[in-house]
Amino acid sequence: MSTLDDAIRNLVIANRILAHEGILDAYGHISMRHPTDPNRYLLSRSRSPELVEASDIIEFTMDGKPVSADTRPPYLERFIHGSIY
């Protein structure tokens, strides 16, 4: 398993744990910095955290733009995540 695969797996688990513990509701979300590119971060597409799967994770640039041509709806707050990183 690659470093990126591990990071995605951990992000999925984090979403599920925080939803299970009631820390995030249907509108909450969690992101993480890309493990090998400090100018990018990972965040799920717009989806309830208890439903997030590895295939839902999108890679973003710091200005909130998806790295790939992913057309699934992203969280509107993704720009805040990029600003924090």
Image (cartoon, helix red, strand yellow):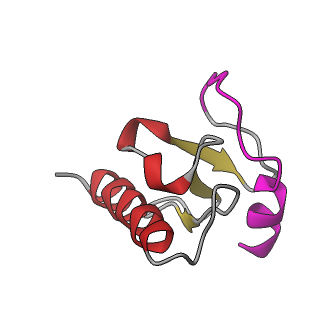
Residue lying at 29% horizontally and 51% vertically, measured from the top left: 5
Q: Is residue 59 above or below residue 85?
A: above
In the image, residue 54 lies in the stretch drawn in magenta:
no
Residue 27: quarter of image: bottom right
What kind of secondary structure does the magenta stretch mostly adopt?
Answer: loop
Occupied quadrant, residue 65? top right
Q: Position of residue 74 (x, y in %)?
A: 71, 39
Magenta residue check for 72: yes
Given residues 39 and 54, the one toward you in this image is: 54
Give me the residue at 83% from left, 56% from top: 79
Which residues, given as a range, are shown in magenta? Answer: 68-85
Q: Is residue 6 left or right of residue 46?
A: left
Residue at the left extreme, as displayed = 1
Question: Total marks drawn?
Answer: 0
Image coords of residue 41 (percent x, y): 60, 58
Q: Tell which of 33 and 30 is nearer to you.
A: 30
Q: Please indicate whether residue 57 sits to the left or right of residue 39 in the image.
A: left
